[in-house]
Amino acid sequence: MNKTIQMIHAPTNLGLRKHPDGRERGCDKLPDTLEQLGLHSAIDAKVTQRISKPEHPIEEVFDEGTLNGRQVATYSVNLANVVQKVIEDDDFSLVLGGDCSVLVGSALALSRKGTYGLIHIDAHPDYYHQGNREQAVVGGMDLAIVTGTGTKLLTNLEGRAPYIQPKHVLSIGYRESDPEQDIIEEATIAGISFCSAEQIRREGLEKTTTLIQNYMNRTNEVEGYWLHLDADVLDASIMPCVDCPESNGLTWHELEHILQTILASNLIIGMTVAILDPDLDFTQEVSRKFCNLLIKVLQGKE
């Protein structure tokens, strides 16, 4: 697919708790780090749009059980305005977070333009809401929010809930060793499809590729798909620079193969990248590998 890529810097930590000593997480530094490492020039991005970093409240405030819910709502509308314009330009949106709350604004933009699906690559289901957790952060709620489950403060911006219908979501990379399998079960009952990291390993990349392709081509109900990538889908041994590293994750090769499969489709119109924290990557070795991976899989989108 030959599309011009427009970069959108969305440097937010609103969807995560601060460190115990009160310091903010460093996910907001990911866009600039990837730019310094050469991502933007390597994929010849047409435009880089930079949304201002939002202020992270000093005290923890849970709005309807959601940390920083009101601030995330405002930021999401601002992000949606930028993503919508890129969609209207018929360009490929590459949104660099930030934490996973950037998916909310991106999904809101999609809902303004039509009916879209989501390929969600993440070590976690991100399906917390007040029905299963009294309080949570948006970084652990984003998939529930965009599919219409949770506080209306975030699920129903502009009266558009759900931004993406659950039956149009495939989530890849959760761990079967996750102790919260009840959350996976709940999301599955809601209509979301899942493919675990262990399933990918059992069945092999060829079968996984076929599964993804069949999923994306199975219906004419959607006009296209959005891709969400959380860096924690990689195994903790090779991706320690995230807020919640998990074992039994994907290898670099497995993730590259899966991303190439997805991005080869003409149905993919944009992508969010989230959670890698440059503050935890003292040598930049991990960030550089991650940047090189993105360059490899995105060069084919030009």
Image: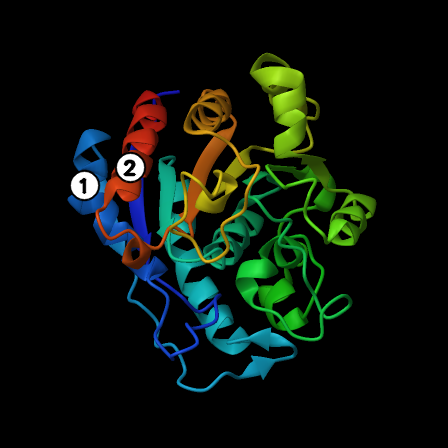
Q: Residue at x 42, y 73 (%)?
A: 18
Query: What whole-number distance in Å separates the C-alpha atoms at marks 2 and 1?
Result: 7 Å
As drawn, the label of residue 136 is none
Which image quadrant is residue 142 in? bottom right
Image quarter where the C terminus lies is top left
Would you say residue 217 is visible in this rendering?
no
Q: Earlier in the sequence, mark 2 or mark 1?
A: 1
Task: Provide residue 5's location: percent of width, then percent of height.
Answer: 30, 35
Query: Which residue position holds label 2?
Result: 291
Q: Residue at x 64, y 15 (%)?
A: 207
Image quarter where the N terminus lies is top left
Q: Name above or below for residue 29 compared with residue 170.
A: below
Residue 44 or residue 171, whichever sits in front: 171
Pointer 1: residues within 10 angstroms few (<14), some, or many (20+)? some
Q: Are marks 2 and 1 in contact (CB under 8 Å)?
A: yes
Pointer 2: residues within 10 angstroms few (<14), some, or many (20+)? many
Q: Secondary structure under badge 2? A: helix
User: Residue 90 vs residue 130: left or right?
Assistant: left
Q: Residue at x 62, y 20 (%)?
A: 208
Query: Which residue position holds label 1?
Result: 37
Name the amino acid type tagged 2: Cys
User: Residue 198 vs residue 187: left or right?
Assistant: left
User: Residue 7 vs residue 216: left or right?
Assistant: left
Name the amino acid type tagged 1: Leu
Task: Provide residue 194's location: percent of width, then percent of height.
Answer: 70, 36
Q: Name above or below for residue 21 compared with residue 117.
A: below
Task: Provide residue 24's location: percent of width, then percent of height.
Answer: 36, 71
Would you say residue 32 is visible in this rendering?
yes
Q: Which residue sits furthest bottom? A: 59
Total labels: the figure holds: 2
